[in-house]
Structure formats: structure tokens, C-alpha cells
Image (tube, rainbow, N blue to C red):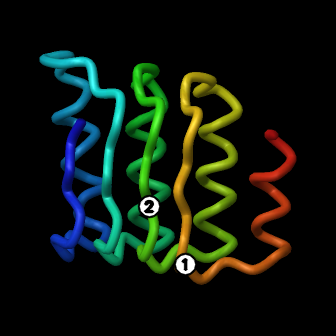
Amino acid sequence: MLQLANNDFRENIGLSLPVLLQSGAFELKVLNLSNNKIGDRGIEILFSGLSHRNSLSLIDLSHNEISDQGLLSITENLKVNTTLQILSLQANLFTIKGLGSILTLI
């Protein structure tokens, strides 16, 4: 488990975290990035980098200013990442329309 909540990383986490995780030094199953203001661009970068990280089973992205565009990035990644079982998205900016893209995967 990697707890990185409440650090105000913003979109910068999308650039650095995937590089660290792809090193293969450990098998990460739970990642908490809640309350970091990652935003859509950070989510896009983060999930493109995590696309090869198949050990994750839970990601907490609550309170990260994710809109419909960010949900589309997540949805595209989840089409190839089949190990993720729990995705927490509370208190973000997406609409029912954006939520529809994720719900097509369930």
C-alpha cells in the first residue's frame, strides 16, 4: 500500500509516480492519491504511465478535481488494465455524462 493523500501534488504526480512504479522494485496493490488536486491532465499522464502496472487492485482518487475528460482517460486505461477492482472517485467535478463512460466497464 502506498499512501500519498493530502500532498497537493497536482498534475506533477502524473509525471513522476509512474516512473517510480515501473521500476519493478515492488508490487503495488493499493494506491491512495486522494486530495491532491491532480486534475484531468495529471490523471491522463498518470494513467498512461500506469497502463503497464497490472498489480494495482485499488486506487483512491477522491478530491482531485477530475472532470468528464479525466474520466475518459481513466476509462481508456481500464479497458486494458483488468486487475483494478476498486476505484474511488468521491468529490470530483465530473457529471453524470462522464460517469457513464466508466459505467460501461462494469
- Quadrant of res 80: top right
* Quadrant of image for the C terminus: top right
Q: Which residue matches tag 1?
A: 92
**Image coords of residue 60 (percent x, y):** 42, 54
Question: The disc labelled 1 sits on which kind of residue?
Answer: Asn
Nearer to us in this view, 1 or 23: 1
How packed mark 1 is, by other alpha carbons closer than 10 Å (few <14, some 14-19, many 20 or more), is some
How packed mark 2 is, by other alpha carbons closer than 10 Å (few <14, some 14-19, many 20 or more), is many
Asked whether, in this view, residue 80 is left or right of residue 103, the answer is left
**Image coords of residue 56 (percent x, y):** 42, 29
Circles 2 and 1, Cβ within 8 Å, touching? The answer is: yes
Please tell me the numbered disc located at residue 61. Answer: 2
The residue lying at 58 percent from left, 33 percent from top is: 85
- Quadrant of res 49: top left
**Image coords of residue 72 (percent x, y):** 69, 58
Nearer to us in this view, 15 or 74: 74
